[in-house]
Image (tube, rainbow, N blue to C red):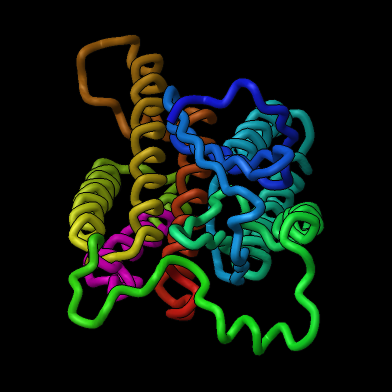
Amino acid sequence: MTSPTSERYRKLPGQRRGFLHGASLWMAPDHILAVKSLRFREEYKRFYLRDIQAIVVATRSRFHISTRACGIAALWLAVFIAARNRAPWGPGVMSIAAICLMVWWLYCSYFHSCSCRIYTAVSRDDLPSIYRTWTARKFLAEVEPLIWQVQGVLHGDWAEAVEERLVGPAVLPPGTPPLIQPTADARRHTLASDIFVACLFADAALNFLTLHSMTRIIEWILYALAFGEIGGAVVIFLQHHRGILRAGMQKLAIATLILLGAVYYVRQILAGVAMGNRPALPDANLLATLPSYLVLRQVEAGVCLILGLVGVALALMPESDTV
C-alpha cells in the first residue's frame, strides 16, 4: 500500500517502538491511519470513521521491551560504570535504582497492559501501538467523539441493540474451512520452554554466585547453559511456527539470543585486551580480575533473571489474557 501524501494527519496517543517492529496511529478528517513499520518497510491501513463498528480494549499482560527501555538500561549501565569507583555507596544506590526500575516495568507489564482491536464489517485488526491501559483511555477519549459525529449516538438500550447486531466480519457457515488456521489452541508453555526458562534462572544464579571465583569448570558450565538456551530458543521458534506455542515465548527467546550475542561480543573484546590479542583461549582467572568483566557478568545475571521472571509470568498468566 502506498504512503498517503495528500492528507493532513495528527498523531494519536500510542506508539510502539522496537528494534525491528514499530507501530503508530494517525488521525485524518474522516479516517484513522494505522502504520506498521519493519525497519525499511512501512504498511498503512485506513479505518474510515463511518465503517468502524467497535473498538475493543481487553486487559492482558504484555512484556514489551521498547527501545526507550533499552535506552534507560544503557544509561543506567553507563552511570554505574562511571560511579562505581567514585563513592562507596555508588554501587548500592545504582543496584536499588535497577531493582526499582525492574519492579516498575514488571508491574506495568502485568497490571496495566492491554490489547486493542478495531472492528469493521470486513476486518478485525489489532492495534499494536495501544498496549498500556492509560494510552488506551487517551486514545478512546480522542476517537470516540469523532466517531459519534459521523455515526451519531445510539440512544435507548444500547446493550440490547449491540446483541442484535453482528460486529466484525461475517461468520463462516458450519463446516466451511477457514482461510487462516486458528491459533487459539496454541499453548502458553511447553517442556522445551520450561527447560529454556530454567536455564535462564540457572545462568543468573551461577553468575551471581561465582562473580569472584571463576574457574575453567564454571566457565564450561556457563557455556553449556548458553548452548541450552540457544537450543531451547530454536525449539521454541519451531513450535511457534507450527502453532504449538504462543508468541510470548518466541519474543522471550529472541531477547535471550540478543543478550547472548551481545555478551559474547563484549567478552571477546575484553579477553582480547587482557590477553594482548594473542590467539589463545581466554584465561578465566585473568578475566575474573578485570572490573569491567565483573560488571559484564553482573549485567548478564540481572538480565537473565529478568527474562526468567518474564518466562514464568508468560507461563502462568490466565488463558484468556493471551493471544
- Residue 237 horizontal side relative to residue 106, left or right: left
In this view, the residue in front, 75 or 238, is 238
**Residue 256 located left or right of residue 289:** left
Query: Where is residue 232, by image quadrant?
Result: bottom left
205 or 51, which is in the foreground? Answer: 51
Magenta segment, prevailing SS (helix, strand or loop): helix
Name the residue at 24% across, 52% down: 237
Q: Please, is residue 250 above or below residue 79 in the view? A: below
Q: Which residues are magenta?
A: 181-205
22 lies above or below 141: above
Whether the magenta-drawn stretch holds residue 182 is answered as yes
Residue 155: image quadrant is: bottom right
Which residue is at a point 62% across and 39% down the rendered structure image?
73
Q: Is residue 193 left or right of residue 69?
A: left
* 159 to 37, vertically: above or below: below
Image spot of residue 72 (x, y percent): 66, 38
Provide residue 47's location: percent of width, then percent of height: 57, 48
Query: Visible in this render: residue 294?
Result: no
Q: Quadrant of the C terminus?
A: bottom left
Q: Is residue 153 positioned above or below 76 on the image?
A: below
Which residue is located at x 47 percent, y 30 percent? Answer: 42
Is residue 132 covered in magenta?
no
Residues 17 and 263: in front is: 17
Q: Nearer the viewer, residue 18 or 73?
A: 18
Residue positioned 48% across, 70% down in the render: 313
Give percent across and percent down for residue 206.
39, 55
Q: Determine the image quadrant of residue 183.
A: bottom left
